[in-house]
Image (cartoon, rainbow, N blue to C red):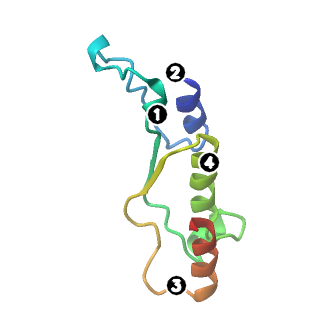
Amino acid sequence: MNARARASATFSPHCASVDLTANRLPMDLPANRASDVVLVHSSDLHVDQDRAAGLGDGDGTATLRAVLATARALRADVVLLAGDTFENNQLGSAILDRARGLLT
């Protein structure tokens, strides 16, 4: 497992990492490794002011903060947040402002 895959595996016990280069044929490998794209994918973060806050020491953005910290540590080119990033569409402005601050 390469260093980037190891770093992503440390984020969460639910995080699976796969070394996609392990099964490539020589002709599939890029000529310039500098052109590799690092993508961090996550889903079901459920940012909120109640349930997630209880899991994250009172911070409903803890899961989002952890994913983005991992993406920074891996120097990700792309972060894909797929589905259920927020618990619902009725969150208060304070939690939305904290999430916006993390995403900008």
Upstream in the sequence, badge 1 or badge 2?
2
Q: Amino acid at mark 4?
A: Arg
Which mark is nearer the camera, 3 or 4? Answer: 4
For the residue pair 57 and 94, the one nearer the viewer reads as 94
Q: Amino acid at mark 3?
A: Leu
The circle drawn on residue 72 is 4
Identify the residue at horizontal 47%, vertical 39% (top origin): 38
Residue at the disc numbered 2: 1
Q: Label 3, secondary structure: give it.
A: loop
| Crowding at mark 1 (Cα within 10 Å: few <14, some 14-19, many 20+) | some
For the residue pair 18 and 34, the one nearer the viewer reads as 34
Distance, label 3 to label 4, CA atoms, is 26 Å
In which image quadrant can residue 56 be found?
Answer: bottom right
Residue at the disc numbered 1: 17
Upstream in the sequence, badge 4 or badge 2?
2
Q: Label 4, secondary structure: give it.
A: helix
Q: Up-down: is 36 above or below 45? A: above
